[in-house]
Each structure stands twice: as structure tokens, then as C-alpha cells.
Image (spheres, rainbow, N blue to C red):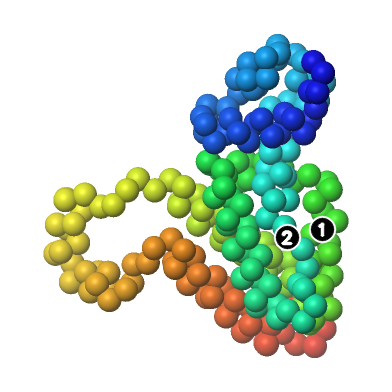
Amino acid sequence: MKGLSREVLIETGLRLLDEVGLDGLSVRRLAAELGVQSPALYWHVKTKQELLDGMASAIITAAGMGPPRDGEPWQEWIRRRARAYRKSLLSHRDGARLITSARRAPGALAGFEGELAAMVRIGFSPALALRTIMTVGDYTNGFVLQEQARIGPPGEEELAILASLPTLSEAFRSGGYREPAEAFEHGLNVLVAGTEAVLGSVPQGGID
């Protein structure tokens, strides 16, 4: 088919993901959407997993990750990076599920190397830099997984149980429960503060 390419497959796959979700996405469904037979797709992606990997890479790339800007404190960079990643995951139905089921493209490693090198230049050891980025990434993935799986507000039975638990009720009334964006920021701030503490306690020569 003229115009059929890996990029077209990934773009169409992401559009179908928004329509039918990860469980409804199949090579056969994608082929039908493109007006071709399934074997025609295998000239561009060898397996469904390869297609999913490409779709996941597109979502990550859209987040615009990269090293800190000139003069940008690492704390603000971590927050900006995590917010952009969350936004990109939320831009597609089941975005977090897709990411967690996919393998990273080899090309993404070069960008990752740039981020780690920048962190090392500002005082992180390579190990701590890697752990920090992975922890923030895992937190973001897990948060969005729950966010995209939300089943709505509590029902009458849950509210009745809540009313019988005074400490939990007070926690809710006093702002312990936050909307997703606020809750995400709270967790992100905790991670940044924890990293500051770890970085400050690292002896000269870095962390093992």
C-alpha cells in the first residue's frame, strides 16, 4: 500500500488506542483501519509487541524529556520532567498501561545518557542519578495507572463506612484527599525532598 510506513502504523495505532483501549487494539483491527490485510503490516513491524514498543516510544518522545536547562535547579527539572511525562501518558487512553508493557527503544538510551550525565555534573553519582530518574518515572507510571483506572466517586455504602471512621473522615475534611493533579504534586514534592536528603548525605565519591 502506498504511504504505508512504520510511522503511519504507530500514528494509527495511537488513534485506535484512544478509541478502543489497549485490550481492543489488535493487528487485525489496525490493518482494517488502514484498509489492508494483516500481513502487509509485517513489512514495517514484525510483531504486535514491536508495534506497542513504537507507540510507547512515541508517547515518551512527545513528553520532550531532556537534561536540565541552563541554570535550572535539578529539583525544578525533576518536577518539570515528571509533569510533562504525566501529561503525555494522560494524552492517550491506557497510556500508562501501554508504557509499562513495552520495551524501550534503543534510540531512547542516548537521551537517557544525556540526562544522567547532566545530573552527574551537578553532584549526583551515576548510580544515584539513575535511581532518581527511575524512581520518579515509576512513581509517575503508577500514579497514572491508577488515575486512568478510576471508577468514580465513592458510593453510599463507602460514604457510610467513612462516616464511622473519625480519623479518616477528619483527614478527608481537612484536605487529606486531593484531586489528581494536587495529589501528584504532593508525591512529587516528597520524592524531591527525599532525593535532597539522600544527596546531602552521600559521602565524597558517591553512592554505591
Tell me which amino acid carries mark 2.
Met
Which residue carries the number 1 mark? Answer: 111
Spatial CA distance of label 1 from label 2 is 8 Å
Residue at 75% across, 20% down: 41
Residue at 33% across, 72% down: 176
The secondary element bearing badge 2 is classed as: loop
Which residue carries the number 2 mark? Answer: 65
Tell me which amino acid carries mark 1.
Gly
Question: What quarter of the picture does the N terminus occupy?
Answer: top right
Q: Where 141 falls versus 24 (above or below)?
A: below
- Earlier-in-chain disc, 1 versus 2: 2
Residue 154 in the image: state x and y as whole percent: 25, 52
Q: Quadrant of residue 82?
A: bottom right
Residue 142 in the image: state x and y as whole percent: 53, 55
- Name, please, the residue furthest toward the top: 37
Residue 125 in the image: state x and y as whole percent: 79, 76
Residue 39 circle label:
none
Query: Does residue 8 appear in the picture of this structure?
Result: yes
**Left or right of 44 in this view: 97:** left
Q: 25 or 4, which lies in front?
A: 4
Labelled pair 1, 2 in contact (Cβ < 8 Å): yes
Q: Count residues near mark 1 (Cα–Cα under 10 Å), then give few for <14, some for 14-19, many for 20+.
A: some
